[in-house]
Image (cartoon, rainbow, N blue to C red):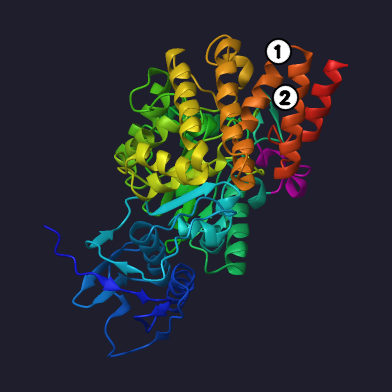
Amino acid sequence: MNLCKPICIAENKKANVVIVAREFKRAAGILTEYLNKITDAEFTVQETTSVSPGIVLRKADHGTHGFCYRIFDKDIVFEAGNEQAMVYAVYDWLERVVGCRYYSRCYEYIPFDANLTVCFEEYGFSPILEYREILYRDYSVPEFAEKHKMTPCSKRDENWGFWCHSFYTLCPPEEYFETHPEYFSLHEGRRVGEKAQLCLSHPDVFEIVLRNLKKHMEKKPEARYWSVSQNDNGAYCQCDKCRKMNERDGSPMGSVLNFVNRIAGQFPDKVISTLAYWYTRKAPAITRPEQNVHIMLCNIEANRGLPIASDEKSAGSRQELLDWKEICSNVFLWDYCIQFRNLVSPFPNLRVLGPNIRFFVENNVRSLFSQCNREIGGEFHELRGYLLAKLMWDPYADEREILTDFLNGYYKQAGPLILQYIDLLHDEMEKAGGELNIFGGPLDAGDTWMREEVFRQYEALFEQAISLTESDREVQFRVNTAAMPVYYAGIVLKYGNREEKIQRIRRFAEQARKTGLVMVEEWKITADKFITDAVAELE
């Protein structure tokens, strides 16, 4: 039985409610802006009012990011403990109750109703994940990130002094290596100052890192998190003292965690973060992180085609998290949703996002960073970001429902065809064994889920989707963008006759120009070079 009492918000483009907000002025401003767009009515914000009905924004403890909204008597009441959580509440209500959708930075759906009346059941939620960040260009914009209740990157900048890979910032080789090579890794029989690590058993290194860290903290006293962590390479120190610590712990993390624990002891009011990455992913057998030490585990070796919790190819990554869970109650997980060497290529990992995030949170992960494409674009970046955001907020949400809602809203009449493509692509990848490598590409699947026979089915589905959207140029632009990975794969695999190859290159090049695509491989290959090389092969 629905006991909800309808509330009339606007009637004939005239506001029927007052927004009451003593504290949450930014959230009230967002609510006013959207209600104006939805109803074409002008709404006022007051600190107090006896007028009813009203939309009341008031302070109440629902956790750091949690909130609640409900109909109380004749009013709509929003509750949250801080401004950011109230902003989340407003965007959530506009989406869940009113029907807004925030598909991408360039397109959101705002319904119009000059006679807006709402009726809804009470909704309250506080997320399991305390930190939620997605590395896509759209989500680097705080205003867009918070529409999806993600941690805005500005908050990371405010709260973090160093994010990761800080050893050489804290003990620079250009300053010390020439006079003190012993401060740096003894690796394969010689001291290395370039693309290596620190000698963490040397007493002078501890004093230098401590001194420099204090200087950085003085410049940014408001930052709570400070990463004291390895550089992005595998050349760790093999000197006798470092080796003994590592042997005692059964992992090169032994020397790192011992060092980081000592640093953390000097800063009890800060959180000292360190990476469990590359050679340090294996948890130490004996050493335990101090209370204020933050473990950032990177599951870079995991297979991306099947759920980590059950896939034998991910047994190592699965065990790493389970081992860290035993000694760390709040794991920060650095996950990967990217194919580094082929940024625009098909990457069918959409079905594992939900199962993986559920596995993470059920094993003490309370902070999740998803490394996607830091460059412009990337395969299904709008869809994947949207799906990730919804699942980071609520890992138990229905991912199929989210997926179809996005496809039908963003690609409109072409949505069902793109869903067919996604299902076929994932089905074929799973039938081939479900192996998906973040350093892989189309050539790896040329005999399986990217073989020419099935590739032509992918291409045909997009041809139909593009044809369906001829009357709507904006939607057709989005469909053409979604088709780019298929064209890219066809170019790499060199399918078809010369005319087909030219057509594929032309379509890819045209859409790359329109979308501003710069890179097709991280750091190395630009879109222009990829296109130029593809054309040159035909001449």
User: Quick check: can you spot residue 235?
Assistant: no
Tell which of 137 and 468 is nearer to you. Answer: 468
The magenta span reads 172-184
- Label 1 crowding class (10 Å Cα cut-off): few <14, some 14-19, many 20+? some
> What is the x, y in percent for residue 297?
45, 39
Tell which of 464 and 35 is nearer to you. Answer: 464
What residue is drawn where x is 57% and y is 28%? 464
Report the residue marked by disc 2.
504
What residue is drawn where x is 55% and y is 18%? 457
> What is the x, y in percent for residue 369?
48, 45
Asked if residue 329 lies left or right of residue 161, the reply is left
Q: Amino acid at mark 1?
A: Gly
What residue is drawn where x is 48% and y is 18%? 429
User: Quick check: can you spot residue 13?
Assistant: yes
Residue 223 higher or lower than 304, as above or below: below
> What is the x, y in percent for residue 337?
52, 35
- The disc, 1 or 2, on the residue closer to the chain's N-terminal end is 1
For residue 496, the mark is 1
> What is the x, y in percent for residue 80?
32, 70
Asked if residue 372 lies left or right of residue 264, the reply is right
Asked whether 182 falls inside the magenta stretch, the response is yes
Residue 430 higher or lower than 170, as above or below: above
